[in-house]
Amino acid sequence: MKEEGIRSEMVLRMMMGLDVSSDEEETQEEEEKEEEKEDEDAEVQDISKAINKTQEESAATEKMDTDADTGSQAEHIQERLAPEATGPTVNEEDLLTGCVGASAAAKSDRDGQTEYLKEQVSYDEVTGNLLDNDKNGVMMQWEDLIMQLHAQVICETNGSTAKHKTILNVGFGMGIIDTYIQEHCPRYHYIIEAHPQVYAKMLTDGWDKKGGVKIYFGTWQEVVPKLIAEKVQFDGIFWDTFGETYEVRRSLLFWSPLLIRLY
């Protein structure tokens, strides 16, 4: 219907002796832009689906490996517990994960990141430590030296500087490593942060106004597909999220070859 309307208008303009060449060019440009946008959206969706599938397959494989390796061990432990008929019932899954008597903790670990993102966090007024809702440390000041060394490794390769490099940090926290990355003056400094309160503090502290800094609010599972679709690549990546399991970490490593720039 839209195309018929455009053609009708062009015919009318030609009958009136008006130039329609510029209109044809504009129409073609608009159609090309729409096609490019549709292709990019489709690519992002495909990558997101692939990441989710990778995480599911990774979790299933991990469970199969665990079942095979620890099946006999679980049976042995159950036999030793059998004589104590009056004792507490031991969940088989707890035996396999080594979390006897801590079933709630094991489940919490699997869904740790989702729960953490819903929690209220705070920054200690004295130390600056990032604390969760129960006042447990999410990131602590004692990590400073570790972060400094990580930044040095990420930003420098064979004595070269970071001035022409693009660096990615997943998980801002207290901003310790990001502060050290800034000291190396990279060309571009990408930061992914998923917690709304941490993200708000980043804006309050002016991180969105620093030269070369690009902030993405969301989980890495949401942001990475967009970066891959945009063909963004990095010279160094640091990843320090909170509450994610081994299966989740392994799925990010699977996608790292598409994010790392090869020299």
Image (spheres, helix red, strand yellow):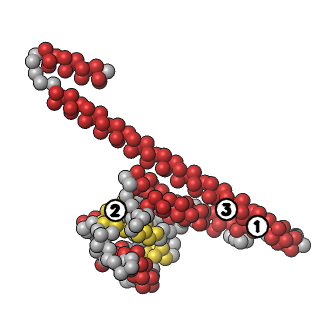
Which of the 4 image quarters holds residue 187?
Answer: bottom left
CA gap, disc 1 and disc 3: 11 Å
State the SS at label 1: helix
Residue 11, above or below 119: above
Viewer-side label of 2, 3: 3
Question: Considering depth in this image, is 150 or 32 the residue closer to the camera?
Answer: 32
Residue 91 visible in image: no
Q: Residue at x 32, y 74 (%)?
A: 162
Q: Residues within 10 Å of mark 2 (few under 14, many from 20)?
A: many
CA gap, disc 2 and disc 3: 33 Å
Question: Considering depth in this image, is 254 or 1 the residue closer to the camera?
Answer: 254
Q: Residue at x 35, y 41 (%)?
A: 37
Toward the front, the furthest residue is 263
Q: Earlier in the sequence, mark 2 or mark 3?
A: 3
Q: Amino acid at mark 2?
A: Ile
In the picture, the disc for residue 62 is: 3
Residue wearing tag 2:
215
Q: Amino acid at mark 1?
A: Asp
Q: Residues within 10 Å of mark 3 (few under 14, many from 20)?
A: few
